[in-house]
Image: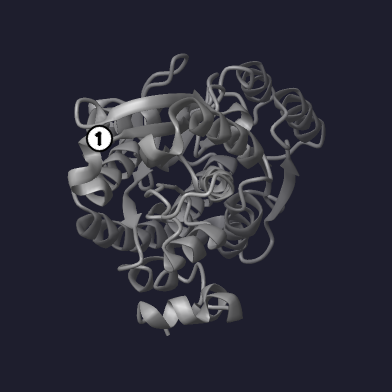
């Protein structure tokens, strides 16, 4: 990650949240400018939205509806989003791009299954005059814009939280690292950030790159780690996201851990937040999906109208195949049971009722979440 991207991140969770919420206002202001000239393009704008998979809850429940809502707002209800989910299949996603090109969408927003494999499709879209916004993952090829989070910072936040949870136990045993899929460039950045915090401070007994980010694969990897290391030796687990954390925790319970070791996560999935409430999962990384989705929609609408992105994107990023791509990098927050109200509830991701169902009511009451 280049220096410009790092400057967009913040040093502490509290500051990150403040900047994130303030930036939401900035995103709205830039969106208001786009709204004012929404009639510049003749005919309604059609945004092609391509998301990578549906095993991680955020894509279908958050990203898609948030982008649809913002596109509608920016176009006075005339713009539409045509959606496709690749279900973790890079070949299928390339076919979906072809379909979007055939259907003559005005702009593409692409969260790539495989950042390298998508490059030829990005090039094809550009050759037919369709600009491409890389969303959440830095796709290769001639992309026009990019918005995501500071992904190394995600890993650093996770690693730091795990060290805090371990305390004096950090040197008394071994941890297991459950990284994401090698096809996802973000996974490598999460891993890099986590290692920057953990290396030299803990012993990493086993480390895995989890195929397709699937919880079932994380579960199998964790069972293998427990068998190889022995459950008495494992003091903590770095999990790159909440879905895998669920599979990991199932394996830990199945192995008969008297007390679960701290497990990290990412994405603030509802199931992950509920596990944090009960103490089964130590933390997650909350990323302001409303802000990320709003920025992507604003970039897409502006590009569809042939406008520059100067008022939206203040920074740039280099990919392996494109230089100085206009970018917006959104800060991240460490989510624990102590700040659920100030993160996912405050930003309207969930209500207390969503989290504190009958099964979790007693645990919610115990931490004052009412």
Residue 46 location, x and y as percent?
70, 47
The residue drawn where x is 44% and y is 78% is 364
Whether residue 305 is visible: yes
**SS at badge 1:** helix
Residue 203 location, x and y as percent?
28, 27
Q: How many marks?
A: 1
The residue drawn where x is 75% and y is 22% is 91
The residue drawn where x is 41% and y is 47% is 263
Taking 27 as reference, is 118 left or right? right
Quadrant, the C terminus = bottom left
Residue sitting nearer the eye, 254 or 109: 254
Give the answer, above or below, for where 108 lies relative to 44. above
Residue 89 location, x and y as percent?
73, 29
Quadrant, the N terminus = top left
Residue 276 location, x and y as percent?
43, 62
Residue sitting nearer the eye, 254 or 219: 254
Give the answer, above or below, for where 310 lies relative to 72. above
The residue drawn where x is 38% and y is 80% is 366
Residue sitting nearer the eye, 84 or 29: 84
Kindly identify which residue carries mark 1.
6
Residue sitting nearer the eye, 281 or 117: 281
The quadrant holding residue 32 is bottom left
Taking 358 as reference, is 105 left or right? right
Give the answer, above or below, for where 56 lies relative to 234. below
Whether residue 10 is visible: no
């Amino acid at each position: 990650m280049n220096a410009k991207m790092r400057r967009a991140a913040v040093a502490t969770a509290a500051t990150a949240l403040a900047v994130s919420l303030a930036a939401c206002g900035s995103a709205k202001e830039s969106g208001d400018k786009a709204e004012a000239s929404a009639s510049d393009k003749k005919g309604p704008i059609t945004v092609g939205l391509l998301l990578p998979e549906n095993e991680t809850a955020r894509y279908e429940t958050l990203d898609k509806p948030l982008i649809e809502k913002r596109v509608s707002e920016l176009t006075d209800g005339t713009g539409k989003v045509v959606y496709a989910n690749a279900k973790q299949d890079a070949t299928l996603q390339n076919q979906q791009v072809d379909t979007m090109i055939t259907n003559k969408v005005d702009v593409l927003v692409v969260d790539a299954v495989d950042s390298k494999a998508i490059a030829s499709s990005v090039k094809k879209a550009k050759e037919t005059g369709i600009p491409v916004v890389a969303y959440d993952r830095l796709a290769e090829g001639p992309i026009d814009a990019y918005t995501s989070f500071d992904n190394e910072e995600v890993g650093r936040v996770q690693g730091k939280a795990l060290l805090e949870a371990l305390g004096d136990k950090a040197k008394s045993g071994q941890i297991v690292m459950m990284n994401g899929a090698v096809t996802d460039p973000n996974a490598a950045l999460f891993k890099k950030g986590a290692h920057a915090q953990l290396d030299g401070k803990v012993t990493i007994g086993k480390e895995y790159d989890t195929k397709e980010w699937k919880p079932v694969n994380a579960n199998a990897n964790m069972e293998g780690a427990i068998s190889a290391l022995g459950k008495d030796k494992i003091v903590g687990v770095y999990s790159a996201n909440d879905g895998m954390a669920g599979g990991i925790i199932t394996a830990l319970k199945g192995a008969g851990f008297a007390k679960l070791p701290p497990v990290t996560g990412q994405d603030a999935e509802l199931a992950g937040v509920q596990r944090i409430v009960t103490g089964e999962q130590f933390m997650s990384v909350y990323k302001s999906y409303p802000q990320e989705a709003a920025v992507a929609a604003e970039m897409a609408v502006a590009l569809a109208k042939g406008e520059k992105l100067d008022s939206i994107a203040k920074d740039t990023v280099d990919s392996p195949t494109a230089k100085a791509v206009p970018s917006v990098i959104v800060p991240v927050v460490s989510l624990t049971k102590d700040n659920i109200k100030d993160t996912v509830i405050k930003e309207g991701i969930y209500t207390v009722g969503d989290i504190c169902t009958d099964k979790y009511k007693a645990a919610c009451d115990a931490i004052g979440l009412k």
